[in-house]
Image (cartoon, rainbow, N blue to C red):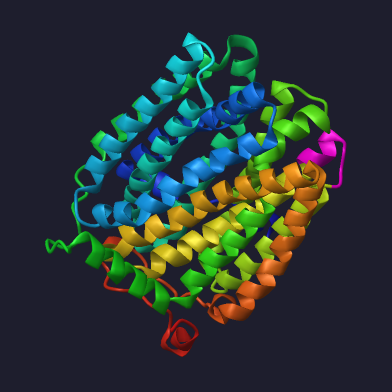
Amino acid sequence: MTVARRLRELAVDVTPLRRSPRFRMLWCGQLVSMTGRQITTVALPFQVYGETRSPLAVGALGLFQVVPLVSVSLFGGAVADSVDRRRLLLGGNVLLAGCSGLLAAGALLGSPPLAFLYGVAALAAGLSAVEQPARSATVPNLVPRDQLAAALALMFGIFQVTLIAGPALGGLIIGRFGLGTAYLVDVASFAAAVAAAARIGPQPPATANREPPLRAIAAGMRFARRQEAIIGGFAIDLAAMIFGMPRALFPVLAATTFHTGPGGLGLLYAAPAMGGVAAVASTGWVGRTRRQGRVVVVAVVLWGLAVAGFGLVGVLWAGLLLLAVAGAADSVSAVCRSTMLQTLTPDRLRGRMSATGSMVVIGGPYLGDVEAGAVAAATTPAVSVVSGGVLCLAGVGVVVAAFPGLWRYAAAAPPPGRAVGATAEITAPASRRSAMP
């Protein structure tokens, strides 16, 4: 096998972008919109820290976001399985743009109360808990089944690219034009997501039978309990994010450890995504890998080691390098976990499972913000980061012991060309079902 062929096999598969116009529309719209969202992700904690000079106050942002996220997510997933998902995308993005507009108004009119910032952050988190499951559950219906892993890698690649562009751009905009302009750029970026959702066509529910919300949520939870690989994937990501997510401390570390301003802060937020983009660009092998559960476990171990190392360094370039390594590991883990989730879940349950995944993926870092801020307030930021990385490694061991089906998971080879949304419920091969009771 030639070197050129090996590189082609490693490179991310862009076939879904070439062959599916509807997926391409969704992808492009999210690329623009998520860049704007990441600008706000930098601006809001920067504003809170600037007004309070308290790492605990910055960490409390996570608490005010995770409560509505957890409260609304399962309900939002049930809604996404019972109505046209395109309508949820349209309405959700319009309302999220309104939240960013409120932040812009507060910044332009003066220094808003801390309660106002927390309240808008909580509202946006609740809206995201409805919009995100609808978006995730739509992707498998836009591509054939044999292109699902590639499509999910491309969607996660958007997230990583915007984690670079958004924070870097946000740092520059805040430093030169102020917080109000940064929030207004975010408002404008939602137009791309709204336009894309309007053009992908209706996304009606898989079944005309609408279950009551509580019964629908219960059905989703029963399905998840039978899939040990899915539950294990959720648990290991929670361990990584709750204990090993240091982002709430970035404003503090930028000012006190690395002695840098808004530009350096933007680089700290962007560094994990730099590694993530490099990893996603080489995910062509994911669709051919059956042992995706083992890949997830190894990736989370690398994440914990890199985060612990980040807490030990005091030079900006070294910290950025370790964050990039952590981001690369997290990207590989996320692509594999998403592939397992969407492959094992039938379309009639995808909204609910996507909502649960969203609750974990988004809620975990918010809880991590609270944990990091609290430990830093009680000790030091460095102790908070290092101890978080160590606890992440311990969490991996606990999860693998509690959910061995994650380590034993082996994907079935998908029949080429068949649409995922048209399949019946998919399970692992019969020889592996005992690993996922």
Q: Is residue 273 visible?
A: yes
Q: Position of residue 279 (x, y in %)?
A: 64, 50
Quadrant of residue 413 in the image?
bottom left
Which segment is the magenta one?
Answer: 312-320
Q: Is residue 14 visible?
A: no
Judged left or right of residue 407, residue 308 is right
Using the image, determine if residue 344 lies above or below residue 69.
below
Q: Is residue 32 a member of the stretch shown in magenta? A: no
Residue at (60, 57) in percent of width and height: 332
Q: Position of residue 432 (x, y in %)?
A: 48, 85
Front residue of 198 and 282? 198
Quadrant of residue 32 in the image?
top left
Judged left or right of residue 336, residue 416 is left
Q: Position of residue 121 (x, y in %)?
A: 46, 34
Q: Position of residue 427 (x, y in %)?
A: 38, 78
Judged left or right of residue 161, residue 216 is left
Residue at (51, 62) in percent of width and height: 337
Q: Is residue 314 a member of the stretch shown in magenta? A: yes
